[in-house]
């Protein structure tokens, strides 16, 4: 009976964490690779393999163009292999390229113009950004967006807000000249501005007052117990009925909001990376597959809309990560193509091979470090 109880416990963990994780990651990976695939077909490249996952094939089929579509055993990414590629990382097979006849060259990725190759590579991350915009827009159109006005309900004693002179009832209307329409907008600016002086315009008693505030850097727990280091003022939002509304958007406005939401994720991510470089942020916030699985399971308990919102955020993050100028990633390929466009000829085979080896080492080190962080996070939770 104890053994059956353990099986039930493991089964519960699979349903709670693994299923949401696979759902989220499969959608993000599929659309990323679909971007590569569609543009490759558009410019006349023969696509040999479209795989969601790595390793041994689980199921698959061949389409009428000869592309093998498959689901593979290791669900930590995916790839599209083009005619002329040596492997799944799109490392060119120069030996095979030299043996190609004219008809094969017309279908080879390696023999396409540098602009066409760059378009194929850039299409993956761009597809991730488009997917995020579409998901956000669908949520705003279908379920709406709950908006709480940026009205201060209370001020924590000794906080940055108290020092700046905030008072209960203040309505924040602008920060550094940027109009504020909701408490969430204010939070987003403040959360990425720890230690920075902000000029905050508030309405108080029918008049406008300008306050100077410097958000404090604090560790804040979310609803699932995850710790985030963000900037805070130390104010709470108003919960009065007149300060809370739900807004459904028309298609055009929803797409605009979706693009704004996508841009916010990009800004937040780049701000964190910049903080890492200058020493303002700590690297323990970097997470890998284990952390993604944990968060997916946690968010899934909040409902399908929350899980789709996470899918959009993860799609933006993966699209942005792939644009980093690291050989082996899309950004590394684009870096090589930029050099080729400037020089008028590609880098030597030796230089490219060395670059891919360095890129592989960097990617592996990042994966190991992120997984180590995940284990420490689980041990401390």
Image (cartoon, helix red, strand yellow):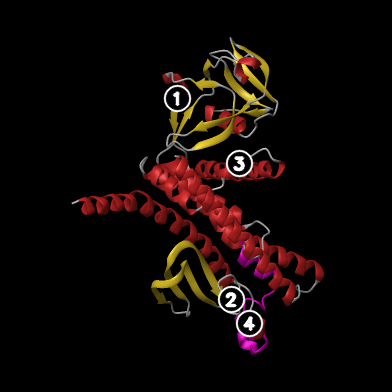
Position in image of residue 112 (x %, y %): 67, 76
Q: Earlier in the sequence, mark 4 or mark 3?
A: 4
Residue with the mark numbered 4: 106
Main structural element of the magenta stretch: helix, strand or loop?
Answer: helix
Position in image of residue 354 (x %, y %): 71, 70
Cα separation between marks 4 and 1: 59 Å
Q: Earlier in the sequence, mark 3 or mark 1?
A: 1
Label 4 residue SS: helix
Cα separation between marks 3 and 1: 25 Å
Label 2 residue SS: loop
Q: Is residue 381 rendered to the left or right of residue 157? A: left
Cα separation between marks 2 and 4: 8 Å
Q: Residue at x 38, y 54 (%)?
A: 18
Look at the picture and state if 206 lies above or below 281.
Answer: above
Residue with the mark numbered 1: 244
Residue with the mark numbered 3: 268
Does 273 appear in magenta? no
Position in image of residue 340 (x %, y %): 76, 69
Look at the picture and state if 168 lies above or below 249.
Answer: above
Sort mark 1 into few (<14), some (14-19) or many (20+) by Cα contacts within 10 Å: some
Label 1 residue SS: strand
Asked whether residue 137 is in view, the answer is no
Going by the picture, which residue comes out furthest to the right?
A: 343
Position in image of residue 114 (x %, y %): 70, 71
Sort mark 3 into few (<14), some (14-19) or many (20+) by Cα contacts within 10 Å: some
Q: Earlier in the sequence, mark 4 or mark 1?
A: 4
Q: Which residues are the magenta region?
A: 96-122
Residue with the mark numbered 2: 45
Cα separation between marks 2 and 3: 36 Å
């Amino acid at each position: 009976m104890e053994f059956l109880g353990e099986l039930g416990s493991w089964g519960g963990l699979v349903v709670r964490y693994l299923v949401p994780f696979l759902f989220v990651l499969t959608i993000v990976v599929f659309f990323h690779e679909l971007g590569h695939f569609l543009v490759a077909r558009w410019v006349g490249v023969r696509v040999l393999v479209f795989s969601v996952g790595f390793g041994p094939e689980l199921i698959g089929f061949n389409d009428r163009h000869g592309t093998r579509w498959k689901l593979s055993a290791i669900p930590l990414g995916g790839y599209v292999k083009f005619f002329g590629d040596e492997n799944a990382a799109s490392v060119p097979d120069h030996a095979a390229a030299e043996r190609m006849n004219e008809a094969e060259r017309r279908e080879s990725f390696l023999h396409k113009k540098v602009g066409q190759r760059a378009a194929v590579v850039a299409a993956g991350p761009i597809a991730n950004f488009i997917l995020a915009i579409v998901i956000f827009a669908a949520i705003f159109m279908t379920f709406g967006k709950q908006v709480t006005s940026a009205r201060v309900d209370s001020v924590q004693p000794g906080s940055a807000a108290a020092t700046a002179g905030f008072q209960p009832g203040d309505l924040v209307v602008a920060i550094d000249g940027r109009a504020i329409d909701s408490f969430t907008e204010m939070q987003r600016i403040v959360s990425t501005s720890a230690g920075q002086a902000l000029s905050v315009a508030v309405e108080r008693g029918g008049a406008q007052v300008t306050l100077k505030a410097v958000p404090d850097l604090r560790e804040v727990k979310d609803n699932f117990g995850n710790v985030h280091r963000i900037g805070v003022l130390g104010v709470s939002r108003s919960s009065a009925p007149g300060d809370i509304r739900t807004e459904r958007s028309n298609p055009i406005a929803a797409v605009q909001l979706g693009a704004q939401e996508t841009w916010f994720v990009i800004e937040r991510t780049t701000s964190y990376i910049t903080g890492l470089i200058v020493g303002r942020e700590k690297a323990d916030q970097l997470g890998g597959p284990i952390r993604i699985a944990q968060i997916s399971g946690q968010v899934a308990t909040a409902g399908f809309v929350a899980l789709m919102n996470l899918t959009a955020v993860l799609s933006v993050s993966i699209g942005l990560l792939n644009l980093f100028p690291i050989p082996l990633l899309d950004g590394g390929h684009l870096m090589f193509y930029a050099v080729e466009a400037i020089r008028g000829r590609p880098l030597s085979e030796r230089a490219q091979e060395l670059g891919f080896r360095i890129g592989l080492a960097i990617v592996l080190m990042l994966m190991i470090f992120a997984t180590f962080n995940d284990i420490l996070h689980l041990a401390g939770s």
